[in-house]
Amino acid sequence: MLHSTTLQRFFQFPGYLEHLQLILVLGTLFTLERIFRKDTKSQQIYSFLIVGGICFTALFIHEGFLFFYLPMIFMYWVYQLPGSIVFNTFRLILLTGLVLQTWLIGTYGLLPADQYQPFLNELQNRFGTNNVDIESMRVLFRGFSSNLNFTWNWFEQRLIEKLIHLGFTFIILSPTAYIFCDLYQEDFRKAWRILFKKHETQNISTPKNSFLKGLLVLSCLTPLILVPIGIDLFRWISISTLNLFVITAFLMSDQEFHRRAAETLYRLRYVLVLVIALSLIFGVLGVTNSFSWVYKLTINLGLGI
């Protein structure tokens, strides 16, 4: 909870509606974990309605939900209820429908260009000039291609500055990454053998479970797909890290994983203390910049824009 990418962010950046999205995500995962434990036909139907309804609603809150949390929710759904071929076909249809919904929102949900200035004036009059993030508001008027061009140009103009931010982020988050890699290395090793060394799978206990767990962990990282089309680089990193914390917490219901996690955290207890210390010392990971003190550093170096 003290990590630079979790609760600190929600207090620091309340305007992104991630609080509401996270509530929906946790509610969905909790329902899947607590209620839908038996892969029966009735549970498949009810889970389909609940997951589909929540994801449909969440996309109207923010279409980025498609990349933020939806892959993780779907993979955890498959992990809990593998289902039959017919049920997975309906899941695929649902996923296709949600992708289509996102496209419709992104295509027809843009505000007309001639409304930019009146909308800006209204927000500044209501909330004050200093409380309106103009760059965030402009996203409402940009389509996919224009946003892609804007993002690349934005990074190109600030390349050295952002590399410095990424360097410090890598250093500060590397102990966290080390713990997660150590925790899940066994599942990834088994998944690799299942995919590319099938003749060795007879020695793997619960190979399907390990393979799905590996995919589940990878699904937590899908916010990083937004790096080329959104300048909120460090926000994408934060959401990915948050997803890993969330899914790890829910996997603790698996006794074997719980035992392995406890052993890993005890063995890496000094690394864990380092993670907590770094989070408390350096604070919250930002949105377009990493840490506030790194931003001040780049300004002093004449690199900040």
Image (cartoon, grey):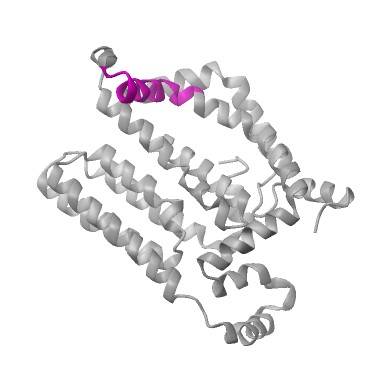
Examine the structure image and report whether residue 191 is included in the region drawn in magenta: yes
- To which quarter of the image does residue 32 belong? top left
Q: How many marks?
A: 0
Considering only vertical position in the picture, is 225 above or below 260?
below
Corner quadrant of residue 150: bottom right
Q: Is residue 63 left or right of residue 141?
A: left
Q: Nearer the viewer, residue 69 or 195?
A: 195
Residue 132, visible in the rendered structure: yes
**Left or right, 36 with reference to 71:** left
Label the magenta part by its dominant secondary structure.
Answer: helix
Can you say whether 122 is above or below 63 in the image? below
Residue 196 percent coordinates (x, y): 33, 22
Q: Which is nearer the eye, 185 or 175?
A: 185
Percent coordinates x, y for residue 243 in the rendering = 47, 43
Task: Write the residue at 41% across / 36% down.
Answer: 217
* Residue at (21% x, 38% y) in the render: 82
Is residue 6 in view from this perspective?
A: no
Q: Assess whether residue 142 is covered by the magenta stretch.
A: no
Seen at 63% across and 26% down, the residue is 273
Q: In the rendered image, which quarter contains the N terminus?
A: top right
Assign the C terminus to one quadrant of the image. Answer: bottom right
Of residues 251 and 233, the one drawn nearer to the viewer in this rendering: 233
Question: Could you say which quadrant of the image residue 153 lies in?
Answer: bottom right
Which residue shows up at 83% across the image and 51% down it?
303
Q: Is residue 241 above or below residue 257?
A: below
Residue 280 percent across, percent down from the top left: 69, 39
Q: Which residues are magenta?
A: 182-198
